[in-house]
C-alpha cells in the first residue's frame, strides 16, 4: 500500500502546483473513517481507496480526482456524510464522491435485473463529470486485481462476468485500452480458467522457442526507420490471452493456426511521420491483404487514432504493427484520462482527439476548471434511465414523462395510469423523468387514456396507444352524438318512418352501415336535408317539411361524452355545467360548445347551431376569474385559502396587471357547476383583501 508521502510525491511529480494539503487531509480522513474495517485479503480496508488513488496517479489526474479516489467509499461504507465531505474538502470533491457512491448503489440495485448494455449506458449518463467515471473504473480495476482473495467461487465469477460485460467495454468505449485489457485478462482467468492456462502456457513456450524474437524484430524495425532519418520508439509484445482466445473462437481455429500473436507498436512524432513509417515498413516487408486500417484519417468513435497493418516478416512470422504519434499513443492507452492530463498543462496547441459523440468540449479551454465546465458526458444525453420497483432498468428519450414510463413497462399499465410515485413522492403523469428515478405507476381500472395526454407523451409507443384508444372512443362518442342529431332530424320529418327506412337511407347515401351514417351526421359530412331526403324521398320538397322547424330545444345531453373527443368546450368562454350552452357544428370538426352569451358566437354564422343541454351528473369545468387583490403582504394567500376552502382547484394563475395599490390576477379554477362558481365568487368578494372578483 502506498504511504501518505509516497502518494503525495507522485502527484507533485507531474503537478507541482497540486493542493498538497487537500491530499494529506483526504488520506488521514479515509484512514480514520474506515478504521478497523478489513478486506477479504485481510488488509485494512483503507488500503483499497489508497491503491485506487495510486492507479489514477498513473493517469496524471488532478488533486481533486485523487482526493475523490481516496474518499470514494467513505459515504457508502462509513458514517461520513456528503455534508461532512463538502465541509472538509469542498463542493467538487463532495459531488464526485457522491457520484461514485450513486454508481455503486445502482450497480448493487440492478444486480441480476438489468441488461449489461443498458447499465453501461446508464453509467455514462449518470457520470456528469468524466472524473467520476474514471474513479469508478479504477475502483473496479483494483477490485479485479484482488479478486482472488474472495473465497466464494460463485461471487468471483459474478464479479468477473460483470467486469467483462460492463466495465471492460465501458473502458474501451472511452478509449482506455490499458484498463480494458487488464480487466479482460483478469476476468478471463476467472471465467475460463482452463482456456486461460492453456493460452498462457503456449505463449510461454512460444517465447522460449523464439528466444529474443520480439527484441530482434523490434530492433529491425527501429533500424529500418532510423536509416531513413525517422526517430521512433518501437516495442513488441504477445497479444493478451483473452484477445487470442476471442480470435480463436471467432475464426474457429486452433492456437497453432493463429499466426499473428505478436504485435509491435511504432511511436513517432507526428501524423506525417506515421505515414512515412508505414511506407518504409510496406517497402521492406509485404503486407497481408485486407489487414490495413487507417484510424488516423477515420478515427474510431471513441477518438482512437492509429495505423494498423499486418506484414509477412522475414522471420517467417505474420506480425501486426500499430503506428501512431506520441499524442495518439497517450489517447490510445488512457483515452479520456489522457485528454484531461494533456489539457491540464494549459497548452492550447496540444489537441488530443476527443470523443465527438461522448463529450462536448469548449474549443479553447484554458484551464482544468474551464474544461470541467464543458466536459459533460454527452453520448447518452438524449436518454434517461429509470427503475421499476423491482429494479428493472427502463430506457427512455430525454424529456420523457411518467406516462411514457408507464407505457414502456406495459400498455395496460399506461392505459390505466392515474399518477406516479417518483422516489416516494406522488407526482402527476406529465412529470419529466430524471436519471436514476425509481417510479411506481398508480393505476385505476376506471381510468382510460385521455386526449390531453398527447400534449406531454413523447415516446412513439405511448402516443400510438393513446391515439388508438382516442380514435376508438372518438368513433363511439361521435356515433352517439350523431344518433342524437339523427333523432332530431327524424322528428322534423312530415310523418313517422318504418325501421327499414334507416337501412334504405344508408344505401342511398352509399355508406357502409348505420354507424357510418351517424358519424357522417355528427361530422356534418351530410346535411340534415340530405338525411331527410334519404329517409323519406321527396320529404324536403313538401310544404309540411318546410313548416316543421327544429324543436325549440333539442336537449342533446353531453353527459358521458369526453371533452376533446366528440366535442370540445370553447376556450373563449369556458362554459361550465349550469350555463345555457349551444353547439357549433362544422364539417370535419368536433362540436364546439359555447355559453349562450359568448361574443364569439357571432363568428359561427357558417356553422350549424345545435341546442345542447348538460346531462345529469355532467363533469365540472374550468372557469376563468379576474381577481383584483390589494397590494399588501398576504393578499394572494387569502385568495388561495378561500379557493381551497371552497373546493376550487387552481389550474393556472397569472399576474395580468399591477399598480401601486392593486394587482389583477387571472385565475383558472376547476368548478363543479355554475352554482359552485357563484359561491366561490361570493366568498372572494366578501374578503377584505380582495377588491373585486368576476368571471371572465
Image: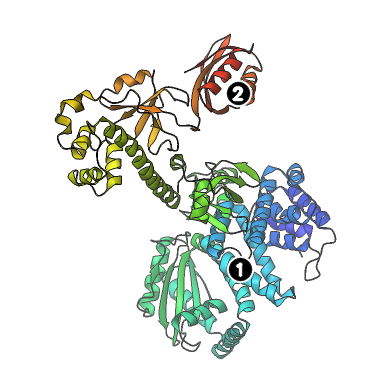
Q: Helix, strand, or loop for circle 2?
A: helix
Q: Nearer the viewer, residue 207 or 48?
A: 48
Looking at the image, is mark 2 or mark 1 nearer the viewer?
2
Distance of label 2 from label 1 (alpha carbons)? 58 Å
Residue 292 falls in image quadrant: bottom left
Q: Is residue 595 left or right of residue 515?
A: right
The image shows residue 44, relative to residue 353, as above or below, that is below
Query: Residue 333: x percent and y percent?
Result: 55, 64
Query: Residue 174: x percent and y percent?
Result: 53, 60
Tell me the quarter of the image containing the N terminus. bottom right
Query: Residue 189: x percent and y percent?
Result: 63, 78
Q: Residue at x 42, y 77 (%)?
A: 310
Q: Nearer the viewer, residue 75 or 576?
A: 576
Q: Is residue 415 left or right of residue 583?
A: right
Report the residue marked by disc 1.
163
Q: Nearer the viewer, residue 264 or 242?
A: 242
Q: Nearer the viewer, residue 386 or 506?
A: 506
Q: Residue at x 56, y 68 (%)?
A: 165
Residue 643 — which label? 2
Mark 1 nearby-residue class (10 Å; few <14, some 14–19, many ≥20): many
Q: Helix, strand, or loop for circle 1?
A: helix
Q: Is residue 680 left or right of residue 287?
A: right
**By what rule are the colours in the image chosen?**
rainbow
The image shows residue 306, relative to residue 205, as above or below, that is above
Amino acid at each position: 500500500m502506498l504511504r501518505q508521502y509516497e502518494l503525495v510525491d507522485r502527484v507533485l511529480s507531474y503537478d507541482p502546483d497540486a493542493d498538497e494539503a487537500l491530499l494529506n487531509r483526504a488520506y488521514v480522513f479515509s484512514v480514520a473513517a474506515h478504521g478497523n474495517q478489513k478486506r477479504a485479503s485481510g488488509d485494512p480496508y483503507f488500503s483499497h481507496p489508497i491503491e485506487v488513488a495510486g492507479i489514477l496517479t498513473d493517469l496524471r489526474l488532478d488533486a481533486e480526482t485523487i482526493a475523490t479516489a481516496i474518499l470514494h467509499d467513505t459515504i457508502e461504507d462509513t458514517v461520513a456524510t456528503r455534508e461532512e465531505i463538502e465541509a472538509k474538502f469542498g463542493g467538487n470533491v463532495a459531488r464526485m464522491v457522491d457520484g461514485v457512491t450513486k454508481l455503486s448503489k445502482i450497480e448493487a440495485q440492478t444486480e441480476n435485473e438489468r441488461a449489461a448494455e443498458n447499465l453501461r449506458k446508464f453509467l455514462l449518463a449518470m457520470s456528469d463529470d468524466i472524473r467520476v467515471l474514471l474513479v469508478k473504473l479504477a475502483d473496479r480495476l483494483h477490485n479485479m486485481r484482488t479478486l482472488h482473495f474472495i473465497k466464494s467461487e460463485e461471487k468471483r465469477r459474478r464479479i468477473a462476468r460483470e467486469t467483462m460485460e460492463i466495465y471492460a467495454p465501458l473502458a474501451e468505449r472511452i478509449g482506455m485500452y490499458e484498463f480494458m485489457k487488464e480487466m479482460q485478462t483478469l476476468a478471463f482467468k476467472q471465467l475460463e480458467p482452463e482456456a486461460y492456462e492453456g493460452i498462457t502456457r503456449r505463449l510461454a513456450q512460444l517465447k522460449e522457442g523464439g528466444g529474443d524474437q520480439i527484441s530482434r524484430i523490434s530492433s529491425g524495425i527501429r533500424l529500418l526507420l532510423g536509416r531513413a532519418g525517422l526517430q521512433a520508439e518501437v516495442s513488441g509484445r504477445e497479444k493478451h490471452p483473452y484477445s487470442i482466445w476471442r480470435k480463436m473462437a471467432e475464426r474457429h481455429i486452433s492456437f497453432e493456426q493463429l499466426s499473428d500473436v505478436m504485435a509491435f507498436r511504432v511511436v513517432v512524432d507526428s501524423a506525417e511521420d506515421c505515414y512515412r513509417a508505414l511506407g518504409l515498413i510496406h517497402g521492406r516487408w509485404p503486407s497481408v491483404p485486407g489487414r490495413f486500417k487507417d484510424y488516423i484519417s477515420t478515427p474510431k468513435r471513441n477518438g482512437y487514432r492509429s495505423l494498423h497493418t499486418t506484414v509477412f516478416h522475414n522471420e517467417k512470422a505474420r506480425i501486426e504493427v500499430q503506428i501512431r504519434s506520441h499524442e495518439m499513443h497517450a489517447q490510445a492507452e488512457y483515452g479520456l484520462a489522457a485528454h484531461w492530463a494533456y489539457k491540464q498543462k494549459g497548452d492550447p496547441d496540444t489537441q488530443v482527439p476527443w470523443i465527438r459523440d461522448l463529450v462536448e468540449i469548449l474549443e479553447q479551454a484554458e484551464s482544468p476548471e474551464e474544461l470541467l465546465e464543458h466536459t459533460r458526458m454527452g453520448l447518452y444525453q438524449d436518454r434517461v434511465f429509470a427503475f421499476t420497483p423491482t429494479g428493472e432498468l427502463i430506457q427512455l428519450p430525454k424529456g420523457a414523462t411518467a406516462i411514457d414510463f408507464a407505457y414502456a413497462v406495459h400498455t395496460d399499465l399506461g392505459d390505466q395510469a392515474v399518477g406516479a410515485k417518483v422516489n416516494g413522492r406522488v407526482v402527476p403523469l406529465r412529470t419529466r423523468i430524471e436519471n436514476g428515478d425509481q417510479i411506481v405507476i398508480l393505476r385505476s381500472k376506471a381510468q382510460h387514456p385521455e386526449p390531453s395526454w398527447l400534449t406531454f407523451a413523447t415516446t412513439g409507443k405511448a402516443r400510438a396507444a393513446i391515439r388508438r384508444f382516442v380514435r376508438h372512443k372518438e368513433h363511439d362518442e361521435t356515433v352517439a352524438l350523431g344518433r342524437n342529431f339523427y333523432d332530431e332530424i327524424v322528428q322534423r320529418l312530415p310523418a313517422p318512418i318504418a325501421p327499414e327506412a334507416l337501412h334504405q337511407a344508408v344505401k342511398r347515401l352509399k355508406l357502409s352501415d348505420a354507424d357510418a351514417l351517424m358519424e357522417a351526421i355528427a361530422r356534418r359530412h351530410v346535411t340534415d336535408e340530405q338525411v331527410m331526403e334519404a329517409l323519406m324521398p321527396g320529404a324536403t320538397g313538401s310544404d309540411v317539411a318546410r313548416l316543421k322547424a327544429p324543436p325549440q330545444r333539442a336537449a342533446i345531453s353531453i353527459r358521458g361524452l369526453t371533452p376533446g373527443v366528440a366535442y370540445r368546450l370553447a376556450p373563449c368562454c369556458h362554459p361550465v355545467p349550469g350555463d345555457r350552452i349551444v353547439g357549433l357544428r362544422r364539417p370535419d370538426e368536433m362540436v364546439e360548445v359555447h355559453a349562450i352569451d359568448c361574443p364569439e358566437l357571432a363568428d359561427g354564422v357558417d356553422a350549424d347551431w345545435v341546442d345542447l343541454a348538460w346531462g345529469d351528473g355532467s363533469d365540472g369545468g374550468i372557469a376563468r376569474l379576474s381577481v383584483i387583490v390589494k397590494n399588501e403582504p398576504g393578499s394572494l394567500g387569502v385568495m388561495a385559502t378561500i379557493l381551497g376552502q371552497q373546493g376550487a382547484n387552481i389550474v393556472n394563475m397569472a399576474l395580468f396587471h399591477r399598480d401601486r395599490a392593486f394587482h389583477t390576477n387571472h385565475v383558472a379554477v376547476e368548478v363543479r357547476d355554475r352554482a359552485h362558481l357563484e359561491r366561490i365568487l361570493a366568498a372572494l368578494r366578501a374578503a377584505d383583501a380582495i377588491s373585486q372578483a368576476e368571471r371572465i
